[in-house]
Amino acid sequence: MRVTRKGQVTIPKHIRDKLGITAGSEVEFVDRGDDGVRLRAVEDNAEDRAARFRRWLDQVKGTIDLGEKTVDELMLEMRGPRDDIDAH
């Protein structure tokens, strides 16, 4: 299998058929370390999206230091006051 200049590969038909992959389907490549890469079809439903989001949160957890600030204080610092509720 060759990789194009754009980093694309053609998934063999028997694999697409087995996984139910059609044009427009979402797929995920999972790095398995020394065991290579796993390809899986991604079902696009709310439960699956929530599970992927939770996995992502687990990966980035602890990567930002808010110091003593709360999330609300940090958001105010980044965005500035909201005209609709902070106007005096």
Image (cartoon, rainbow, N blue to C red):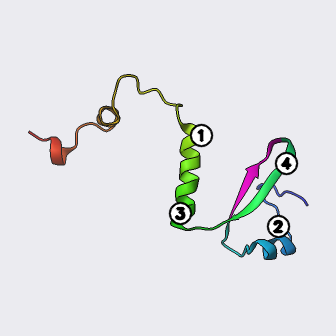
Q: Closer to the N terminus: mark 4 or mark 2?
A: 2
Dot 4 alpha-carbon crowd within 10 angstroms: few under 14, some 14 to 19, many 20 or more:
few
Disc 2 secondary structure class: loop
User: Up-down: is 7 above or below 15?
Assistant: above
| Distance between mark 1 and mark 4 Cα atoms | 20 Å
Question: Which residue is more in the foreground, 20 or 11?
Answer: 20
Q: Amino acid at mark 4?
A: Gly
Which residue is located at x 74 percent, y 51 percent?
Answer: 30
User: Who is closer to the viewer here, 59 or 78?
Assistant: 59
Name the front one of labels 3 and 1: 3
Category of crowding for the residue at label 3, using alpha-carbon neighbours closer than 10 angstroms: few (below 14), some (14–19), many (at least 20)? few
Q: Nearer the viewer, mark 2 or mark 1?
A: 1
Amino acid type at mark 1: Gln
Residue 36's label in the rendered image is 4
Amino acid at circle 2: Ile
Q: Is residue 84 left or right of residue 4?
A: left
Residue receiving disc 3: 47
Residue for badge 1: 59
Most foreground residue, 37 or 24 = 37
Q: Is residue 49 above or below residue 77?
A: below
Give the vertical position of 20 relative to 11 (above or below).
below
Please tell me which residue is depicted at 36% across the width and 22% down the height of the picture: 68
The span from disc 2 to disc 1 (Cα, nearest Å) is: 28 Å
Q: Of label 3 and label 1, which has the lower sequence position? A: 3
Q: Earlier in the sequence, mark 3 or mark 4?
A: 4
- Residue plotted at (57% across, 46% down): 56
Which secondary structure, mark 1?
helix
Q: Secondary structure at mark 3?
A: helix
Magenta span: 27-33
**Which of labels 3 and 4 is toward the front?**
3
- Spatial CA distance of label 3 from label 1 is 19 Å
